[in-house]
Amino acid sequence: MTVMEVMAVAIKTGKGGTRTPAQDKKHYKDYQGTPEQIKKRSERNKARRLAEKKYGKAAIKGKDVGHVKPMRKGGKTTKGNLAVQSRAKNRGWKAGKEGT
């Protein structure tokens, strides 16, 4: 199978991390475009801006800005509740490993 054939199958089946424009639009409408997700994205962007101001862009490049008390547990986006972390540590809660 050529690379182009593999890509065509990935697009057609939605497998391989590639979505068609129609699939992207539906995903945004059904998930990313919901008021809840828009608010969460806004809070994450605010957290990153606060950390950039405090530490500088170079210090947080390639890292995540996480909440010490997670937003899902009522944590707020304030300077005292933010921590610069590696991506693995910040996103590890999904695997049952709480980050700081």
Image: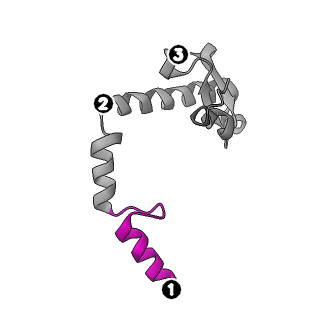
Q: Residue furthest front?
A: 96
Residue at 28% of width from left, 60% of height from top? 22
Left or right of residue 9, residue 21 in this image: left
Horizontal and vertical percent position of residue 25: 29, 53
Find numbered disc 3 in the image and state the secondary structure of the residue it sits on. loop
Horizontal and vertical percent position of residue 23: 31, 57
Q: Earlier in the sequence, mark 3 or mark 1?
A: 1
Q: Which residue position is annotated with label 2?
A: 35
The image shows residue 24, relative to residue 55, as above or below, that is: below
Q: Which residue position is annotated with label 3?
A: 75
Q: For the residue marked with disc 1, what is the amino acid?
A: Thr
Q: For the residue marked with disc 3, what is the amino acid?
A: Gly
Horizontal and vertical percent position of residue 88: 67, 40
Q: Is residue 76 visible?
A: no
Q: Which mark is residue 55?
A: none
Residue at 40% of width from left, 76% of height from top? 8
Could you say which quadrant of the image residue 41 lies in? top left
Give whichever of 97, 41 is nearer the camera: 97
Q: Give, as a single range, the part of the protein colored magenta.
A: 1-20
Q: CA distance from mark 1 to mark 2?
A: 42 Å
Q: CA distance from mark 3 to mark 1?
A: 49 Å
- From the viewer's perspective, is the residue at label 3 or at label 1 nearer? 1
The image shows residue 15, relative to residue 89, as above or below, that is: below
Which quadrant does the C terminus fall into? Answer: top right
Task: Say few, some or many: other residues with alpha carbon within 10 Å of mark 3 (under 14 / 14 to 19 / 20 or more).
Answer: few
Q: Residue furthest bottom?
A: 1
Residue at 46% of width from left, 81% of height from top? 4
Q: For the residue marked with disc 2, what is the amino acid?
A: Pro
Q: Which residue position is annotated with label 1?
A: 2
Left or right of residue 75, residue 80 in this image: right
- From the viewer's perspective, is the residue at label 1 or at label 2 nearer? 1
